[in-house]
Amino acid sequence: MSAPPTVSVLGYALLGLLARGDQSGYDLAQGLKDPVSFFWFAQHSQIYPELARLEAARLVRHTVVAQSERPDKKVYSLTPAGQQALESWLEAPAEVPRMRDEVVLKAYSLWLTDPYNGLRLMHEHAEAHAHRLAEYERRLELLLKKDDIHRPDSPWFSVYSVLMRGIGYERSYLEWCRWMVERLEGAGKS
Amino acid sequence: MSAPPTVSVLGYALLGLLARGDQSGYDLAQGLKDPVSFFWFAQHSQIYPELARLEAARLVRHTVVAQSERPDKKVYSLTPAGQQALESWLEAPAEVPRMRDEVVLKAYSLWLTDPYNGLRLMHEHAEAHAHRLAEYERRLELLLKKDDIHRPDSPWFSVYSVLMRGIGYERSYLEWCRWMVERLEGAGKS
DNA sequence: CAAGAATATGTAGAGATTGACATATGTAAG
DNA sequence: CTTACATATGTCAATCTCTACATATTCTTG
C-alpha cells in the first residue's frame, strides 16, 4: 500500500515524451524545445532532478549507454508503473489553463504612454508570431503527407493535434497584433 | 545613486492597476480576477508582500482608511517614481510569451489512451471556453457603447485591447476543441 | 594546437508561486 | 444565537522555475 506517487506536470511531460521512445535527459531537454515548447518547457536544470524523482518513484528507469564518439549517457525508459501513471493523468480532468502573458499585460497599461511604444511592441511581436506561424504551417504540410495522423492511437495524431492548436494560437495572436497596429497607427498622429 | 529597483512582472501588474486608481491590496486581488485574470493572476498571499516590496522601493505608498462597516484598509497609490517605473517597463521590449498549457500537453499523449478520454476532455474544455467567450463578448458589447475606447490614451482603449485578445484566444481555443471532438468522434467507433 | 560548438550531466541559490494557516470585523440568513 | 459569507491583511512552508556555475568528452574550424 504505497501512496500514489505525486508527479508534477513537468513529470508527466517527461513521461509523455518517454512514451514515444527511450531518451536521455539531454534528448528530453531538446524534445521540450522543438514541437513541445509552445505548450510546455523546462531547462535541463529542472529536467535532471525531475528524472531522478521519477526514478525514485519507479516510474522510469535508466541504463547507461557508452558512446564512442560522445560522452556516455543515461537512457531512460518508462516502467509499467510509469505508463500507468501517465494514463491515469490523461483520464483525470484538467483545469482550464490560465496564462501569463506579459505582452497583453503591457497592452493593459499602454494608454499611459506614447502610442509609438505600443506600435513598436506590436510590430515586434507580429513579426515573432508570423515567424512561428510559418514554421508551424511548414511542419503541418510535411505532416499531412502521412496518413497515420488520422488514427487517434497514433503518436502522429497527437503531433497533428498540438500543431493545430499552435497554428490557431499563433494565427489569433498575429491577427491581434495587426489589429493593434492598425488602431495605434490610426490614432498616433503625434 | 540608487540601483534601479528590480520589479517583478507581478509588481508591474499591480502598478498598472494602481495607475487606474488608488486601491487596497484586497481590491487589487479582485482586480487581478476579473478582466485581467486571463493574462495575469496572483493570490492575495503574493500581492501583499509584493505591495510591501513596491513600497520599500518607493514606487507606491499607502494611507490607512478607516471604514465603519468593514475592517480598515490600506489604500495604495502610485508615486511619481512608480509611474516612471511603469513607463520604463512599457518602453522596454518584451519576450515572446511562452505558455504552459496542461490540456495541450495531454493532447500530446492522447494517442496512448481510449479516444473516449480525449473526447471527454475536449467536451469539458469546449464548454469552459465557450462560456468565457460569451462573457468576453458580452463585455465587448457594453464597451463598444463608449467612444473613449478609440483614443489610445484612454484606459478604456486598453480594456478594449485586452478584451479583443481574450476573445481571439478563446475563439481559437474553442475552435480547436471542436475540431478535436470531430476528429475523435469520427474515429472512436470502439 | 587552440578555440569553439555540440553533446552530456549535474548542483546551487534566488526568486516566483501555491495552498494552508491565521486573525479580525460586520452583515445576513437560519 | 449560531453559522456562513464578504471584507480585509497578513505569514509560512513547500514546490516550482530560472539563472548561473561546474565539469567532461569529442569534433570541427582556424
Image: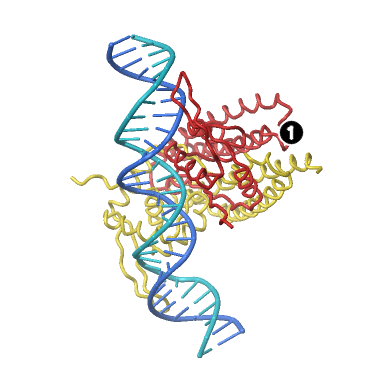
Chain colours: A red, B yellow, C blue, D cyan
Q: Does residue B107 appear in the picture of this structure?
A: yes
Q: Which residue is mark 1?
A: A150
Asked whether residue A190 is in view, the answer is no
Q: Nearer the viewer, residue A162 or B111?
A: B111
Where is residue A89? Give x, y as percent.
Answer: 62, 49
Q: Is residue B49 left or right of residue A65?
A: left
Task: Say which residue appears at 51% left-offset and 30% top-offset.
Answer: A27
Whole-percent x, y for residue A152 in the image: 72, 38
On the image, the x and y values in percent for residue C12 come to: 32, 43
Of A186 and B24, the residue lying toward us: B24
In the rendered view, would you say A74 is above or below B136? above
Q: Identify residue type, mark 1.
A: His
Question: Is B10 left or right of B185, judged from the image as shown?
Answer: left
Closer to us: D24 or B114? D24
Whether residue B10 is situated above or below residue A180 in the rendered picture: below
Q: x, y (%) of residue C4?
A: 35, 19
Instruction: Tell me the chain of label 1.
Output: A
| Drawn side of residue B168 relative to residue C1, left or right | right
Comparing D24 with A50, the one in front is D24
